[in-house]
């Protein structure tokens, strides 16, 4: 090994990568991998693209909602939520109606078929979660839940001011 390589390695030891960066990368990588696996499974088993599934989840409480509400709940922009709702309506998973109090407003709700689909996908997701968490003891699972909730609360408080511009 040359002196330059040795000097480079010594410098690397003096300036390690920040631990927070590595942790955030690991969390983001895990989240991306899990989301991609779930999306592939929903697509393969149920024929649901991600925006369509987000609409189904947004309507999961059974209460009809406007497309704007569905978009906000599902983290979608309005045009994407509208296209997803149209695709789901063609398949009989949602139905669109006009608001009885405001004829200009369109409401969307899950059909009986949509509610059954929502339950099946939710059951599958819970089973996959249990499989993933089986690597941890029950006390570790509770601790993970507690720590994730704590980080989420802190992140919300710390990051909220950054969103204001």
Image (cartoon, rainbow, N blue to C red):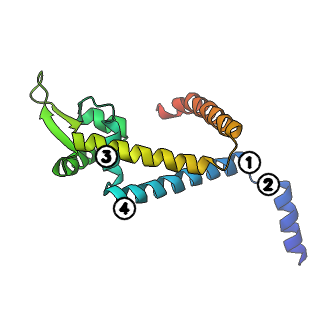
Residue that mark 3 sits on: 117
147, above or below 87, in the image: above
Q: If you read the primary sequence from the N terminus, does the residue marked by circle 1 or circle 4 appear first?
A: 1
Label pair 2/1, CB-CB below 8 angstroms? yes
The image shows residue 153 at horizontal and vertical percentages of 58, 29
Give me the residue at 50% from left, 47% from top. 127
Label pair 4/2, CB-CB below 8 angstroms? no
> Under tag 3, what secondary structure?
helix
Give me the residue at 11% from left, 30% from top. 104
104, above or below 37, in the image: above
Of badges 1 and 4, nearer the viewer stands 4
Q: Which mark, residue 19?
A: 1
Give me the residue at 58% from left, 54% from top. 29
Label pair 4/3, CB-CB below 8 angstroms? no
Residue that mark 2 sits on: 16
Q: Looking at the image, which residue sits at the far top?
A: 101
Q: If you read the primary sequence from the N terminus, does the residue marked by circle 4 or circle 2 appear first?
A: 2
Residue that mark 4 sits on: 44
Of badges 4 and 3, nearer the viewer stands 3
Q: If you read the primary sequence from the N terminus, does the residue marked by circle 2 or circle 3 appear first?
A: 2
> Under tag 4, what secondary structure?
helix
Q: CA distance from mark 4 to mark 3?
A: 14 Å
58, above or below 23, in the image: above
Of badges 3 and 1, nearer the viewer stands 3
Q: Which mark, residue 81?
A: none
**Tag 4: Cα neighbours inside 10 Å, few (<14), some, or many (≥20)?**
few
Q: Is residue 108 left or right of residue 51?
A: left
Q: Is residue 111 left or right of residue 154?
A: left
Q: If you read the primary sequence from the N terminus, does the residue marked by circle 3 or circle 1 appear first?
A: 1
Numbered disc total: 4
The image shows residue 87 at horizontal and vertical percentages of 21, 51
């Amino acid at each position: 090994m040359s002196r330059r390589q040795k000097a480079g390695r010594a410098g690397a030891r003096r300036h390690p990568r920040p631990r927070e960066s590595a942790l955030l990368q690991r969390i983001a990588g895990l989240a991306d991998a899990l989301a991609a696996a779930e999306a592939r499974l929903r697509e393969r088993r149920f024929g649901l693209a991600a925006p369509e599934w987000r609409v189904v989840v947004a309507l999961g409480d059974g209460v009809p909602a406007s497309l704007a509400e569905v978009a906000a709940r599902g983290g979608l922009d309005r045009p994407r939520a509208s296209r997803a709702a149209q695709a789901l309506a063609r398949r009989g998973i949602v139905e669109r109606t006009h608001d009885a109090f405001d004829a200009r407003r369109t409401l969307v709700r899950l059909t009986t078929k949509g509610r059954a689909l929502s339950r099946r996908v939710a059951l599958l997701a819970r089973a996959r979660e249990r499989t993933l968490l089986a690597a941890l003891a029950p006390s570790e699972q509770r601790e993970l839940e507690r720590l994730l909730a704590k980080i989420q609360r802190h992140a919300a408080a710390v990051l909220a001011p950054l969103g204001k511009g």
